[in-house]
Image (cartoon, grey):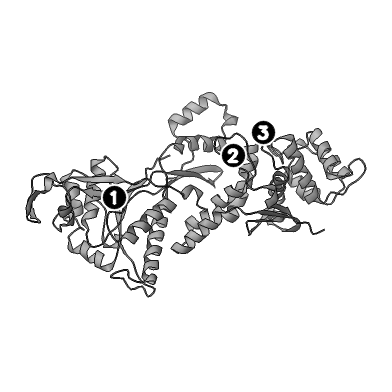
Amino acid sequence: MQFYSPEPLLIAVIGTSPAVITETLFGLHQAKRAHPKHIRVITTSVGKSAFINSDMLGEDGKVNQFCRDYGLPEVDMSEDDIWVVKDDDNVALADVNTMAQHAALADLIIESVRSLTTAVTETEMVAKLPDELLASLEDELSEDEFTPELVREALETLHANRPGFLSLREQKRDGLSYFSAEYEKYQIHASIAGGRKSMTFLLGYAMSLFGRENDTLSHVLVSDPDVERSAEFFYPTISSQKHRIADKEVDFANVEVMLADIPLVKMSMNMPDDIRQSKMTYSETIKQFEKSRNVADIRFYPDCSRPGPRAQTEFKVVCSGEEVWLKTTYFATFWGWAEFHRPVGRNVSSGLALKIVECYLYLLGAKPEGQFADLASAARFIMSQDMLDYDEDFLFGKAKNLTMNEIVAKLEVLNPTERLRGGVMGKNTDRQRHRLVDALKKAFGKNFAEQHAPSKPKGEQHYVFPVGKDSIKVIYDK
């Protein structure tokens, strides 16, 4: 399988001084950073004209002249890569002077950064591992152990440490499992060396919101302020070039241009997928992100159900005012964890297991009978007989509205082939939490899901529930 390296891309805001682009390229080169393969510029119609009229583009333009002077690959850039802010009527703006124009600028910047940071590329699909890895695995495993799951695990390990790796994708064709790796398409360097103050703030803030691990932000510093303001200077030249600037002679070869890195507080890991992937305005993006960070309360509705996919029943949960329907397995796990409300280590504790099984039984509509006069007694018996390894499809497809005696009796005679690896409970807290987070992510996005599911505080070894007991409500309708 091929590896992929995200392509370096420079995005910058500029006003009427296009030299900030070549100055940034020089700064990156001096700092031994990745040389951009692409450039995107955000500006006004006046800024675009200044950029074009300064001969920045084309094979003989100043951008590629700089590249040739310093022995660097030429940059792929055309007029289409100059993104101009426009009003509601799609008319290019010469300046930003009104609230509406400022909002349009903010929307353009946030959408530009969002689209670049979410762009992905995919490697060619393959049906097997690289020969060298395949040989090493075959030495350790028998043929019947060499499964698509093992191939997936090995490929994920192979790609995991590569910059920009996102995930592995699998497709079935003619009985074979084909895999491809998905990578971030670009590695972003953003420059706020040009443009109005509002432009530089907005680009910096957008990078803080959407910037990923290897994305960076900078300003450039020019040693001589008069040179910095000069329309003649674009970058320190290789050979001596003397110019008369502000009544003094300046050799452009001796001008210092320095890249000033600006550390980013990166929030993209906490950005819900639905915000990352949708075309929201700047204001709406901020509003939705702030909303996703606030965990207010969690309300469970165990008597409020509806038919779900594949004939499974779903139950309603409301997290911080947002409604989601979870299938019985996930609802019982979530509800049981909320009821238990104590720290849990790597392995599922008996106390947590008991609460989750009680919740399962309630959702099944199990009727008290004989020795099982309540949910807790039936749950304790099921746990004592090690009956938690059975297929959840049996429990929630065939065991509804039975007495507790009938449920226990059916569990005792269930064929071992109906077992589900890990059981309805499983024995690993990480796995249970992962399944729950996946279910919540489909409704809320990653950040919101992580904030409402049990998590490990930094430096701790135990999972804790995200809200206090006072913020958990169970609404019964019976």
Neighbours of disc 2 within 10 Å: few (<14), some (14-19), many (20+):
some
Residue corresponding to mark 3: 347
Q: Nearer the viewer, mark 3 or mark 1?
A: 1
Q: Tell me whether the residue at label 3 lies in contact with that at label 2, contact meaning CB atoms closer than 8 angstroms.
A: no
Residue at 31% x, 54% y: name it. 192
Tag 3: residue type? Asn
As helix, strand or loop, the secondary structure at mark 2 comes to loop
Q: Residues within 10 Å of mark 1 (few under 14, many from 20)?
A: many
Q: Mark 3 or mark 2: which comes first in sequence?
A: 3
Residue beneath disc 2? 456
Residue 51 position by quadrant:
bottom left
Is 385 or 46 nearer to us in this picture? 46
Residue type beneath disc 2: Lys
The quarter of the rendered structure image containing the N terminus is top left
Mark 3, other Cα within 10 Å: few <14 / some 14–19 / many ≥20: some
Question: Which label's residue is closer to the chain start, 3 or 1?
Answer: 1
Relative height, residue 142 to residue 20 (above, below):
above
Residue 139: % across, % down: 51, 24
350 to 288, vertically: above or below:
above
According to the image, label 1 marks what residue? 219
Going by the image, does 123 lie left or right of 219?
A: right
Give the percent coordinates (x, y) of residue 187. 36, 47
- Relative image position of residue 439 (x, y in whole percent): 62, 50
Residue 361 image offset from top left, x and y in percent: 80, 46
Q: Give the distance between the C-alpha atoms of the residues marked 2 and 1, in whole angstroms.
A: 37 Å
Left or right position of 287 against 85: right
Q: Residue 473 — which label?
A: none
Q: Residue furthest bottom?
A: 89
Q: Which quarter of the image is occupied by the C terminus?
A: bottom right
